[in-house]
Amino acid sequence: MKIYKFGGASVKDATGVKNLLKVLESTGSENLLIIISAMGKTTNAMEIVVSEYLETGTFNLNPVQEYHYQILNGLFDNKNAIVFSKVEKQFAELKNFLTHNKSTQYDFVYDQVVSFGELISTKIVSEYLNENGLENRWMDARSLVKTDERYRYANVLWDETRENIVKAVNGKLIITQGFIGADSNNFTTTLGREGSDYSAAIFGSCLNAEKVVIWKDVPGILNADPRVFADTRLLSEISYEEAIELAFYGASVIHPKTLQPLEQKEIPLHVKSFLNPTEKGSVVCKMEGLNPWIPCFIVKQNQVLISLRSLNFSFMAEENLGEIFKLFHSYQIKVNMIQNSAITFSVCVDDNFNNLEPLIQHLKAKFKVDYIKDVSLYTIRHYNVDAVKQIEASKEILIKQISTQTFQIVAKA
C-alpha cells in the first residue's frame, strides 16, 4: 500500500478537487489509501461555531454549509446526485448533536463538532472520484483509529488501531479522514491541530506501507517558510533525525508526531507539490543529515515568554523545576524553549488551550512571575554567521540561546 495525504489547501474549492483527480491519474491509484483534511479553512470556521455555541447556546452553520454546497455545485452537474443527500445527512447529524448536547466541556464539544469537516470533505471527494471513473471505498477513520479520552490531543491505542486497520484495509482505492479517531465509548477524538499528517503515519505504519506522500502547495520541504522568509531553498533529502528536530522546533510542513512511527519501520515520507505532482519534491528517509547542508529557519509566533523567580531567593533546583513542569503538563502548556540561572527560570511556551491565566495565578503562589505575550521564537538549525545576522537584524531580543547545531532567540513581535 501507498498512503497519500491531501491537506485542506489542496481541496479548498472545486478546482482543487478536480486537480486531486489529475494527481491520481498521473501517479496511479492502485493499492492506495488517501487521507483528506477538511476543505480550506473549514476547521477555523468550525472553531467559531464551537465558541459561539458554548458562549450563547446557539449555532449558525449556514456559512459552512454554503461553502461546501458551492464546491458541490462546481463538481456535480446533476443536482440530484447522491452526494448532496450524503452531505446533508452529515450536517443533519451535526445539527442533532448541537441541539441535544448537554456537555459544556470545550475540548469534548470541539472534537464532536470540528471533526465533521473531515467527514464532509471525504464524502465529497469520494463521490467525485467514483463519478469520474476512480472507484473507491469510503471508510470512517473513527472505526479504525482508537484513542484514549484526551480530547483535542488524543493518544493512539496502537494495538487496537493496528488490528482494526489491518483487518479492514484491502488493496482497493480507499478514502478516509485525517485528524480524527474515537475513544472506547465511540465519541470522536482529534489528534491535535494539523493532525492529518500524523494520521497518514498511523495508517502507513500499521500497513507497513511502501511510502507515505504528503501533498502540499509548496514544492517540498523548504529550509524556511516562504510566507515569512525570502529566497527559500528546497531540501531534497532529510534524515528522520533531522526532520524530527525541525518538527520539534516548529517547522510547519511536518506534524511533530508524524515521523516517529515511520522511522521505526524505515518508511520513507515524501513531501510533494499537488500543483506539480511529477516533480521529485523532498523525501525523509534513512540517511545522515540533510541535502543540501544549509541553514534552516523556523519561526513560531504568538508565543508567551514566562520568567519565574523564587520568592525567597532560593535556587531554582530540581524540586522547583519538577513542580513547574508538572503544572505545565496539567494546564496543557507546550514548552518550546528553556533557559535558567541560579534563581530564575524562563520558558517560551504555546498557549493553544487558553490556559495561561489560570497557570499564572497558580505559579504566583510560589514564584515571582513576569510574562510577555505575543513574542516570536526564531530558530536556526545549522546556523552560520550570515544566518544569525539575518535573524537578529532589527529585532528586540529578549533571550538568546546557542548550541552546537542550533541558534535561538525570543524577540518581541
Image (cartoon, rainbow, N blue to C red):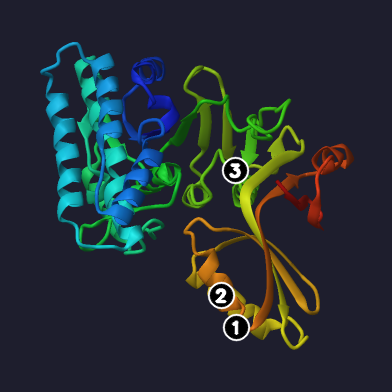
Q: Amino acid at mark 1?
A: Ala
The percent position of residue 156, horizontal first and vertical second, equals 37, 58
Say what secondary structure mark 2 lies in. Answer: helix
Label 2 to label 3: alpha-carbon separation: 46 Å
Label 1 to label 2: alpha-carbon separation: 7 Å
Which residue does the image show at 38% across and 40% down from the upper left?
A: 43
Pointer 3: what residue?
A: 286
The percent position of residue 53, horizontal first and vertical second, equals 29, 51
Q: Amino acid at mark 2?
A: Gln
Are the residues at dot 2 and dot 3 in contact (C-beta closer than 8 Å)?
Answer: no
Q: Amino acid at mark 3?
A: Lys
Determine the residue located farthest toward the top in the rendered image: 77
Which residue does the image show at 36% across and 51% down from the upper left?
A: 51
In the image, residue 369 sits, relative to residue 130, either above or below, namely below
Q: Which mark is residue 361?
A: 2
The percent position of residue 18, horizontal first and vertical second, equals 34, 16
Which residue does the image show at 27% across and 45% down from the upper left?
A: 141
Q: Is residue 135 visible?
A: no
Say what secondary structure mark 1 lies in. Answer: loop
Say what secondary structure mark 3 lies in. Answer: loop
Q: Earlier in the sequence, mark 3 or mark 1?
A: 3
Quadrant in the picture for residue 173 = top left
Q: Is residue 72 visible?
A: yes
Are the residues at dot 3 and dot 1 in contact (C-beta closer than 8 Å)?
Answer: no
Pointer 1: what residue?
A: 365
Check disc 2: other Cα within 10 Å, few if <14, some if 14-19, many if 20+: few
Q: Nearer the viewer, residue 364 or 280?
A: 364
Label 3 to label 1: alpha-carbon separation: 48 Å
